[in-house]
């Protein structure tokens, strides 16, 4: 019989979890609390399923009380991260859950930034303070990470985006086609990864849950080394114990890995190998992630209504429909299949029919030209931004309505219910369970 030396039994892991819970509950000094919380967070990153054990033995109550009675900023950050890792979810900011999603689209992500700038201007608040949940695919995941995780301004994001696009999409054609044949990647993958690491460092997704005001973030990739293609969710949070998403995922990865995986567009960049999975562009399965975001929010806030869903596209080009006199070429047929697979408007039409009135808002500006995903010519970029601004001016009434819905404050009765629920959770401390005695 072969015995794996690195194997750890489930009972041993649960015993270790209980030890962490006991140590946290007994910690008194600020340094002791901080150190034990850090150890516990590291433990949950390795064994995320152990959040159920931690919850069962009353850790939620301990953490909520500690959060109320701790003045140390560093300890508060660790408490917030521990709460997120065990699956605790704070009430939304407004009357319900406010959701923002951004489609994939390469350099056309500059279109979504024009819409975000106007939303921020109308609401009079920084964009990162307006939403409870944000979800992106490919270029959308990058924009949301810059704005919501790293909290750069929209202007800074735009400048950074143009700079990085020029670096990533400048390529000698001969070399590009050679790479395409050799490793299915027209552009320099090493350069792309170097830029991501340089701009985003080695921060893990879960690190951003240290800030209790940071919205929950997710990004989608597509798993290509399993029997059937499936979306994978990079998250900054864990779902509550006993709650399961349709989409596998984790918060244990670094931010740059998340963006790299979500942006691995076939032909542009080779697939990204991470742990046991091979990731490709999330747009292969869900180029418009609005439905996925709603699914996750229903799991996180099952008793809260959806206050607003703001879905941002990165521009669409609709030429005049012309009948073809002959059968389309093989290349044209392949292009049609790709367009169909990455279509974003079918999701839009479904949500428009299903969501309550004054809840769902889709902004996907019309483009005057067919802009490619890797477009970096200055005149094309300026035209793209101009088209987006013109669309926003023509649809200002819809933008104002979306902002008004987004800004609806939480009702007093809801705040009272939130307070009551928190008090109940703090009183539900299973002391016997925490200290290992009988219930």
Image (cartoon, helix red, strand yellow):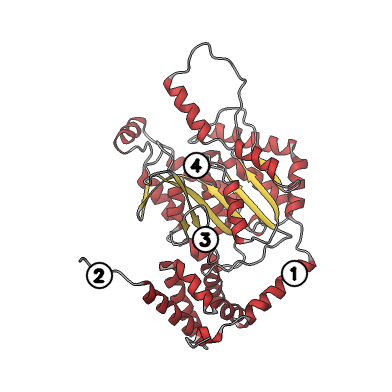
Query: Helix, strand or loop at disc 1?
Result: helix
Distance from the alpha carbon under mark 3 to that under mark 2: 31 Å
Distance from the alpha carbon under mark 1 to that under mark 3: 25 Å
Q: Is residue 425 left or right of residue 45?
A: right
Give 169 or 331, whichever is nearer the viewer: 331
Mark toward the start of the polypeptide (4 vs 3): 3
Q: Residue furthest top?
A: 325
Query: Helix, strand or loop at disc 2?
Result: loop
Query: Helix, strand or loop at disc 3?
Result: loop
CB-based contact (under 8 Å), mark 1 and mark 2 = no
Q: Is residue 258 left or right of residue 94?
A: left
Label 2 crowd (10 A; few <14 / some 14-19 / many >=20)? few
Q: Name the residue tied to disc 2.
A: 5
Where does the image place residue 233, in percent across and percent down from the top left?
49, 53
CB-based contact (under 8 Å), mark 3 and mark 2 = no
Q: Name the residue tied to disc 1.
A: 415
Q: Name the residue tied to disc 3.
A: 236
Mark toward the start of the polypeptide (2 vs 4): 2
Q: Is residue 151 visible?
A: no
Label 3 crowd (10 A; few <14 / some 14-19 / many >=20)? many
CB-based contact (under 8 Å), mark 4 and mark 3 = no
**Residue 285 disc label:** 4
């Amino acid at each position: 019989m072969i015995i794996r030396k690195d194997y750890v039994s489930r009972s041993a892991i649960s015993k270790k979890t209980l030890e962490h819970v006991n140590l946290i509950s007994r910690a008194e000094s600020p340094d002791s609390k901080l150190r034990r919380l850090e150890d516990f967070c590291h433990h949950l990153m390795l064994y995320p399923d152990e959040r159920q054990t931690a919850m069962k033995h009353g850790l939620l109550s301990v953490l909520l009380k500690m959060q109320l009675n701790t003045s140390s900023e560093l300890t508060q950050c660790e408490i917030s991260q521990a709460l997120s890792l065990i699956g605790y979810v704070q009430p939304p900011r407004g009357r319900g859950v406010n959701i923002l999603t951004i489609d994939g689209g390469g350099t056309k992500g500059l279109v979504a930034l024009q819409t975000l700038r106007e939303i921020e201007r109308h609401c009079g608040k920084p964009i990162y303070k307006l939403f409870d949940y944000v979800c992106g695919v490919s270029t959308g995941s990058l924009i949301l990470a810059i704005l919501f995780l790293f909290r750069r301004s929209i202007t800074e994001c735009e400048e950074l985006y143009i700079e990085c696009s020029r670096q990533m999409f400048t390529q000698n054609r001969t070399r590009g086609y050679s790479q395409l044949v050799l490793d299915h990647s027209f552009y320099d993958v090493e350069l792309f990864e170097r830029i991501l690491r340089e701009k985003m460092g080695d921060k893990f997704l879960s690190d951003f849950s240290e800030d209790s005001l940071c919205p929950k973030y997710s990004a989608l990739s597509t798993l290509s080394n399993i029997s059937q293609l499936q979306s994978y969710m990079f998250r900054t949070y864990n779902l509550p114990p006993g709650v399961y998403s349709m989409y596998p995922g984790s918060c244990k990865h670094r931010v740059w890995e998340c963006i790299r995986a979500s942006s691995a567009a076939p032909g542009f960049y080779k697939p990204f190998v991470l742990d046991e999975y091979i990731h490709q562009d999330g747009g292969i399965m869900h180029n418009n992630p609005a439905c996925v975001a709603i699914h996750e929010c229903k799991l996180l806030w099952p008793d809260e209504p959806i206050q607003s869903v703001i879905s941002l596209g990165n521009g669409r080009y609709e030429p005049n429909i012309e009948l073809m006199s002959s059968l389309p070429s093989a290349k044209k047929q392949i292009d049609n299949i790709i367009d169909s697979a990455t279509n974003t408007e079918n999701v839009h039409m479904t949500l428009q029919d299903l969501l309550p009135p004054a809840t769902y808002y889709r902004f996907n500006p019309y483009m005057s030209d067919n802009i490619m995903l890797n477009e970096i010519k200055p005149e094309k970029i300026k035209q793209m931004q101009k088209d987006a601004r013109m669309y926003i001016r023509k649809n200002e009434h819809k933008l104002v309505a979306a902002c008004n819905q987004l800004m609806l404050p939480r009702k007093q009765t809801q705040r009272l219910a939130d307070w009551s629920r928190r008090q109940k959770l703090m009183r539900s401390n299973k002391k016997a369970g925490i200290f290992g005695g009988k219930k």
